[in-house]
Amino acid sequence: MTQLASPEAAPAGAPAPQKVFQKDLNDRFHCTDCNDLVPNVVEDFAAGDYICGNCGLVLGARVIDTRSEWRTFSNSDDNTDDPSRVGAAGDPLLGGMNHIDSTIISQRDGGSGTARDLNRVHGKATNQKSEKSIMTAFKEIQTMCERIGLSKIASDTAKQIYKKAEDQKVLRGKSPISIIAACIYIGCREQNATRTFKEICALTKVSKKDIGRNYKVLMPLLEKPSKEISLDSYVIRFSSALDVGQDVKRATSEVLKRAQALGTLAGKSPISIVAGCLYFVSSMSKPGDEKSAKEIAAIAGCTEATLKNAYKLLYDVRDTLGKDLKMPRDESALSPP
């Protein structure tokens, strides 16, 4: 069997290629007096120098110590160990660090004399009244958002809107809690975490009228138009609270699309629309699985009369809305309003 030579292999009998010597580009740090191939360089971080260990020649000065340093730089009176030199993390909602709060007072006297007095004065100077009020409002927003199960991004959006309103003084004279309520409602809409006016009213104890007024004033502060309310999110929330099956959720979303295309419930509030569609589809469930108008109205936060008015409009076009919903019963099982 014949072995084929590689095209890169040198032909037999040819002289071996000579090595090409290139310039050494390595950076070598050595003593210029000793010229030792194995330099003995000592790092003196206390003095910030590089010193030759053989002849004592100073090879470099003002050397930066890159090792970890665990000295205490705490500026509090309790002398707690704090190896951080940079202080607490900056909050983008409270502005930059271009003012006096970036200053750190040394505690060379152990925090018992002048350093303690300077820290006390520095604390009073940095705790500005406006920032105190904003921090109080932020804590209130965070607490309320956690109470109704909102995500962090929704609470941060509400905080940003409150900060803009505070900076531009658009709601001067209004009570802080009413501004907070409007900011939380806008934050919910912006992040598709829909909450009704009644839910925000029950959370903040602020009237619907006050929330609506502040909402209209805060709308121009948004960088883009506010998102439309997602009816599907209401369907998911109300269906989960009523503990209905997936077939009811799917059919309710389909009835919503058909009703919007026909304009059957034009002018109705989103809650009454979703509640009416849920009652419409629930009436087509298996016997015993239906939900009463009272149960749905209690979950949706509307009156039973409002729900039945919406259901009446849907019942008039039941042949179109209830067609091919794949429910246990068809539209003939619907009870007249």
Image (tube, rainbow, N blue to C red):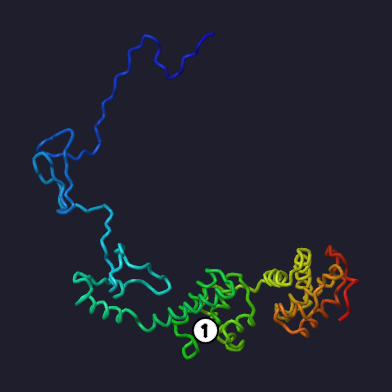
Q: Is residue 16 above or below residue 140?
A: above
Q: Quadrant of the N terminus?
A: top right
Tell me the quarter of the picture where residue 272 sits. Answer: bottom right
Q: Secondary structure at mark 1?
A: helix
x, y percent for residue 25: 25, 36
Would residue 210 appear left or right of 305 to someone viewing this image? left
Q: Position of residue 269 (x, y in %)?
A: 71, 80
Which image quadrant for residue 72? Answer: bottom left
Depicted 86 relative to depicted 292: above or below: above
Identify the residue position indicated by label 1 in the image.
179
Spot the residue most to the bottom: 173
Counting every numbered tag in the picture gives 1
Identify which residue, 27 or 246, lies in the foreground.
246
Image vertical order of residue 278 relative to residue 175, above or below: above
Within-10-Å neighbours for mark 1: few <14, some 14–19, many 20+: many
Residue at x-position 39% and y-position 83%? 130
> Amino acid type of disc 1?
Ile
Please tell me whether residue 4 is drawn above or below residue 133 in the rendered image.
above
Place of residue 224 in the rendered image (x, y in percent of width and height, measured from the top left): 55, 73
